[in-house]
Image (cartoon, rainbow, N blue to C red):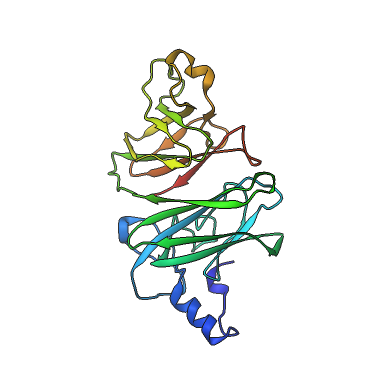
Amino acid sequence: MTLKSISMSGLPARTARRAAIALLTLISAAACGTEEAPGPLSPSGALGRVRFVNLITDPSRNPVNAVLENLPFGVNLGYGGTTPSSLPAPATASYSSILVGPRTMVLKRTADTTVIVATINLTVAENEDRTVYAVGGTGGAAVSSLTTVDANPVPTSAQAMLRIVNMTSGAVDVFVTASGADLSLATPAVTNLAAQTGSAYLTLPPGTYQIRFVPAGTAPASRAGAVSLTVTTGAVPTLALGGGAARTVVAAPSTTGGTPLRSFVLTDR
């Protein structure tokens, strides 16, 4: 479903006004150079940009629908699902433009939308890109959220940008190397990245890289045997980065929490 299929004609006046002035606008904008989607609402006012990632570790509550200020933001989002990139064309984009200010996102179980999985409060800031992660839920526990501010620098055609977000339970060192490089001789690209935090963007030459995670502080001789996660794209244990590309690699727990760890690659540019 796209936002163009929604009518507000049957809504009470207050609800219609709120929907019209509050929110989600998948519009084309040049701010920060981030790809954004077109949409039916064109509000005036300052905008920020938002995307959502589902990392809820409770299969009984997945997949979810994301509803932002009473308008659909994502549908049938399984573990690792993200929106708006999963929306049908022409709404597909890396981020969606949203009016600045306090906003509310409600997550509902797709199979039974009367079940509210979580309510997430967020603040949209002007000219900022933010990613909202829904996390937790293992064994029926409460689902919470974490929001990162995404700097989204603009790479040149001779550069690629890469950022790491660690949603696992412990600090990690991250190695970004040629495929098969000896970790005992390698220098970590990111060191001691704490749980539920993100790194700064790395600037890399375009190419194909192997990205491996080990527990922070692992001795060089022990790194190869301590790898907790190797990032894969499809079935390939490498990530290709073209010139001008920017990506976020997310390390996350399994679908039920804990191990084996999972990785997801988000397109920033």
Q: Residue at x 35, y 64 (%)?
A: 29
Residue 28, percent from left and from top = 38, 65
**Corner quadrant of residue 256:** top right
Viewer-closest of 262 and 238: 262
Residue 231, percent from left and from top = 51, 33
Q: Residue furthest bottom?
A: 13
Res. 99 in view: no
Residue 247, percent from left and from top = 41, 43
Q: Residue at x 67, y 59 (%)?
A: 110
Viewer-closest of 230 and 99: 99
**Corner quadrant of residue 156:** top left
Res. 147 in view: yes
Q: Residue furthest top?
A: 221
40 sits left or right of 32 in the view: right
Numbered disc total: 0
Q: Residue at x 40, y 38 (%)?
A: 241
In the displayed structure, 254 sits above or below 179; it is below
168 sits left or right of 177 in the view: right
